[in-house]
Image (spheres, grey):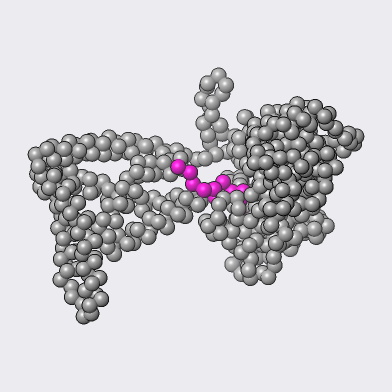
Amino acid sequence: SSRVRGLFVPHTKTGNPLVDSVAEHQAASNQAYWQYLHILCFLAPTGFLFMLFRFGDASGFLFVYALAAYFFSHKMVRLVLLTAPIASILGGIAVGRIISWSISVFLGEDDDDSTNGSKNVLDKENETKGKSDGKKRKEKKSSDSFAGITAIRDGFIEAGRSTEGKIVKTILAIILVGALYMQADKFKTYSWRISVSLSNPSIILKGQTRDGKVIKVDDYREAYWWLRDNTPDDARVMAWWDYGYQITGISNRTTIADGNTWNHEHIALLGKALTGSEEEGYQIARHLADYVLIWGGGGGDDLAKSPHLARIANSVYRDHCPGDVTCRAFGFVVSPLFARSVSWSHILATSTLNLSCAILQDRQGTPSPMMERSFLYKLHSHKLKPGVQADPEKFQEVFRSKYGKVRIYKILGVSRKSKKWVEENRQCDAGGWFCPGKYPPGLKEILDKKKDFAQLEDFNRGSKDDDYQKQYFENLNNPELARKRAVLKSQQESKPAEKKVKTLSEEEKVRIYSTWEDTEDTTLMWKIVTSNAVEDLERWLESDPGAAWLRSADGRGPMWWAFEGKKQEIVSILMKMGVPHTDKDKNGLSPVDLLKE
């Protein structure tokens, strides 16, 4: 599956947008290791080294276990759990060896077991006689190679037997024991503290108001209890799959999706409903649910996650974000006034990306046209932002939590026909515990547009989707280009009328052309030209014709790169704009010279 494949490729590049959207599938950071292992982050590697010096069958098992656990936990943060047993074992080895050595120093014993062990190994090798001359020569070479290491070790041990050496060893032993004691006390306190934080329910949180007052945020439990106490027993709740198990377990209500996300197409339909237009989302929701639950209040709420939802929806419903595989047209954008007042390089340098999916975001959180029209945005920002209101003929807000973390809407005009059809056509297995649902006929028109997602591991299906996967990876590997493409598309959507062709004065051309420096714009231009992205170049030059005259620190610009890569169409575009092809770069080469090379 993609989850397994994700262990062998960088995060967000499994080819499956559903898997890539889960935070637990991200690569583990140093902070994550320290949070869960604490001082073992240092003791375990020390124990690993000690283990290598006395390698055997048991050590071989620990060696393999340690490498496998670290490799997989480093690839996926949820697998840090795998490192806990081996980290404890290796940490114990380190502590045991240090304490054992320290005690031997305090008692005045000579700690030369390791030396004797090495000598025994050499004696055995020298005593072993082969039947052939080749074997004898190998034994002699092995003995000679160990002799140097043994001599160095013997030298240290002899030095340690001197009076000065004993004093140094005693001081070192005192320091090591004292450090271990202090760290053990800190580790004990930390373990109790983190056990409390991990044991507490995650839906009840501590918060702090602007005046510094500490409060208890109990919004999520209150919302689930409201569903339990104020909705019919057969009520169906539409929410993103993250909260499915909580709704089922606490509210005792049916949810449209939960953590069992094996049905990629079903999750995509839910994503399409939430990130599609308000009307489209409503037409899906009225056939599947009675209520909609939205997480709000900022942070990791539904709106922050929504670019991922759009991307997942587009993996099955390709008309959701046409021509935009990773749905970067859905997110937050730079406001038009802000975009006109700064350069592209400044925008790219100062913008932030919302969960690696959104477009460039301004401080006001201006939504892109696609997000602004969406079902989710209307319900999330209902009466919170000027001019944003859910259709009162389709939705009725029935619950808003104390701090605005959860909002629940009742869907008006629910299709009773579809609800009855689903109940009458339920099919369960012999035990009655597995009852795969069926979609009502009312959704047929929408379902006919879907294309079952074929991930890279579906070798037994016989289905492939190479074009989708290619574009998906291209957008992930070149986020700057994908972002700029999305911004340009967003600007075109927000201003469909009046197309004014921008022109540059000769003074502006000279100023740009005479400035040689490496910037985000020159890097992006190089990527566009070398990848022959003609449409992206045309859109960029349409909004900013000065980009054609950019030059990097080595004196080269788009004309040089176009000639070097033999991009004839791009050369023609640049020549029409008047960009010269005979000027020299830093090394005295013209674009034509690169063509000759």
Residue furthest to the bottom in view is 131
Q: Work out whether residue 424 or residue 528 is closer to the camera in this orientation and state it.
A: 528
Q: Is residue 383 visible?
A: no
User: Can you give x and y, in whole percent of width and height, for residue 324 in the image?
Assistant: 75, 49
Q: Residue at x 79, y 52 (%)?
A: 568
Q: Nearer the viewer, residue 419 or 532?
A: 532
Horizontal side, residue 386 vs residue 168: left or right: right
Quarter the N terminus occupies? bottom right
Nearest the viewer among 540 and 44 is: 540
> Would residue 103 be found to the left or right of residue 486 on screen?
left
Q: Quadrant of residue 102?
A: top left
Among the 4 quarters of the image, the one containing residue 421: bottom right
Residue 451: % across, % down: 75, 60
**597 is within the stretch colored magenta:** no
Tell me where residue 358 sits by quadrant.
Answer: top right
Farthest residue to the top: give it.
211
Residue 448 percent location from the top left of the image: 80, 60
Give the farthest residue toward the right.
498
Residue 597, compared with residue 215, is above or below; it is below
Q: Which residue is located at x 32 percent, y 38 percent?
A: 188
Magenta part of the chain: 19-30
Total number of numbered discs in the rendering: 0
Is 190 on the left-hand or right-hand side of 151?
Answer: right
- Residue 436 in view, yes or no: yes
Residue at 30%, 51% in the rendered image: 49
Residue 23 placement, left or right of 323: left
- At horizontal 65% and vertical 34% (from top left) the residue drawn is 517
State whether residue 323 is above or below residue 403. Answer: below
